[in-house]
Image (cartoon, rainbow, N blue to C red):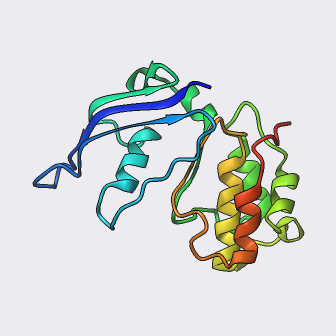
Amino acid sequence: MGTAFDVQDLRFKYPSSVGDTIKGVTFDVREGEIFGLLGPSGAGKSTTQKILVKLLEDYQGSIRYFGQDLKAMGHSFYEEIGVGFEMPVHFTKLTALENMEFFAGFYKKTAHIQELMERVGLWEYRNVKVGEFSKGMKVRLNFVRAMLNSPRVLFLDEVTNGLDPKNARPIHSIPTSTTQ
């Protein structure tokens, strides 16, 4: 297996900050590896993730994604990654299924939405507007959204925050082989 991410001397400073938020971080993530960023609040974990998913690009250092310079990668990069942000973002006036069908439209290949929603216990609520969902249901739907394109690399930022152990279990055990 190859190296998914090779990060060398990563540095980042927000324009409004006095000093660097990320101060020379070096690490690599092998394909198939589960990798976690741990540290106190404000340590730069979410900022590092935002850089790795190309939401922040004004960084110093080197990042290679499967051997390619991350800065040089185009939109095809987004076909290969899934992202579950800490704060779920959905269209509250659409149903759960309408949300997933909308977001699936951004990708060339998609996963089986029904299978994913069944795995996290949401299929029976597919026709309910997301605005009526509990926090836990929104978190689980956020995970389904991250898996919509059967990503090669999955980024999760506190994806089970707010979930009880019963509802977190399916997320921990879901396979990535749900492509149509």
Is 161 drawn above or below residue 31 in the view shown?
A: below
Q: Residue 139: give x, y in percent of width and height.
A: 64, 68
- Residue 92 shows in the view: no
Q: Which residue is drawn at 29% across and 63% down?
A: 42
User: Residue 144 sits in which quadrant?
Assistant: bottom right
Q: Which residue is drawn at 77% across and 54% down?
A: 174
Q: Which residue is drawn at 20% across and 46% down?
A: 13
Q: In which quarter of the image is the N terminus?
A: top right
Left or right placement of residue 162 versus residue 70 in this view: right
Left or right placement of residue 166 versus residue 54 in this view: right
Left or right placement of residue 156 versus residue 13 in this view: right
Q: Residue 177: give x, y in percent of width and height.
A: 80, 40
Residue farthest to the left? 18
Q: Residue 125: give x, y in percent of width and height.
A: 84, 71
- Residue 3 shows in the view: yes
Numbered label tally: 0
Q: Quadrant of the C terminus?
A: top right
Q: Residue 135: give x, y in percent of width and height.
A: 63, 77
Front position in the image: 68 or 165: 165
Q: Which residue is drawn at 82% across and 67% down?
A: 122
Is 39 drawn above or below residue 52 in the view shown?
A: below
